Amino acid sequence: MIAVRGLTKQYSGVRAVDGLTFDVQPGRVTGFLGPNGAGKSTTMRMVLGLDRPTSGGALVAGRPFASLGEPLRVAGALLDAQAMHPGRSGRDHLRVAARSNGIPLRRVDEVIEQVGLGPAARRRVRGYSLGMRQRLGIATALLGDPAVLLFDEPMNGLDLDGVRWIRRLVRELADEGRTVLLSSHLMSEMEQTADHLIIIGRGRLIADAPIAEVMRGGTHRKVRVRTPSTDELAGALLRMRLLVHPTDDGDLLVEGASAETVGDVALRVGVAVHRLAEEQSSLEQVYLDLTGDSVQYRVHAEPVLAGEARR
């Protein structure tokens, strides 16, 4: 597994990572989330020995990554799809990585096939699209058949088919018992893929729990209710200082209440209820609730009046 203990990184007065401690366990996909500038990439770089911690440390399979003689056999990573020699072909890039890590060259063709590069592997990297570079980076990570994998925004530049492929790939890798750490800003994909979440903000740990537990802890509760007495029920709910929104299909959407509370109010005022259901918060909403105080760059938009919008 990946073990992080008290990991801290200071840059001339700015603490990018602040005492992080967590484990990334084998056999599951661990999502690594946080706003821009939260310290995710810096953390992953320190795990891989690319940046030196100010204090604390990280172990990969029980050892510091920098101490591994053939690191690609232990852990594979995609951190920056642009960090490749542009004058080499994709296949030569993989051959160099294989030779330097004692990996049989037959693995080069195997991973080229696995990631779907095909004939493009013989072209120079400078002519690759971002999506092709992502596939080459993932092929490099898989080259040594490692037990530990770290992916930083692997879905950038991929089309829908590529995104689905990444989703299946990381799921299969975890199901094989590997340790998978996946960083992404695509909440819908993370919601479908991750088993466990580590969320950080301003370099500090915010959450470290199974995704189902994180979702249950969301504060953004909503209840959808349908009644022939919409105005009467809405008035009763508003008097309880609950937020009530009419929907396009005639239902009421009630925020900050449980289905039991809305049902009790309907019973008390004597209105019929034809539908009553709690709507689960999306991971995106739960994430925004958790990280709202940790966002460094925020746009404060001024309200625009209808007449001004046409000018």
Image (cartoon, rainbow, N blue to C red):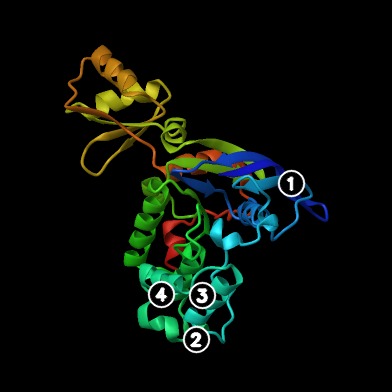
Q: Do labels 2 and 1 touch, CB within 8 Å?
A: no
Hey, what amino acid is under mark 4? Asp
Name the residue beneath numbered marker 3: 94
Residue 82 appearing in the image:
no
Q: Earlier in the sequence, mark 4 or mark 2?
A: 4
Residue 300 coordinates in the image, percent (x, y): 58, 53
SS of the residue at dot 2? loop
Q: Do labels 4 and 1 touch, CB within 8 Å?
A: no
Residue 261: numbered disc:
none
SS of the residue at dot 3? helix
274 or 77: nearer the eye? 77
Q: Counting other residues with Cα less than 10 Å from the Cα at mark 4, is it few (<14), some (14-19), or many (20 or more)? A: some
The Cα–Cα distance between marks 4 and 1, rounded to whole angstroms, is 39 Å
Q: Earlier in the sequence, mark 4 or mark 1?
A: 1
The quadrant of the picture occupied by the N terminus is top right
Q: Counting other residues with Cα less than 10 Å from the Cα at mark 3, is it few (<14), some (14-19), or many (20 or more)? A: many
Name the residue beneath numbered marker 2: 124
Hey, what amino acid is under mark 3? Leu
Give the foreground label among 2 and 1.
Answer: 2
The residue drawn where x is 29% and y is 15% is: 264
Q: Earlier in the sequence, mark 2 or mark 1?
A: 1
Residue 8: numbered disc:
1
Hey, what amino acid is under mark 2? Arg
Query: 27 above or below 165?
Result: above
Hey, what amino acid is under mark 1? Thr
Name the residue beneath numbered marker 4: 109
Q: Earlier in the sequence, mark 4 or mark 3?
A: 3
Q: Do labels 4 and 2 touch, CB within 8 Å?
A: no
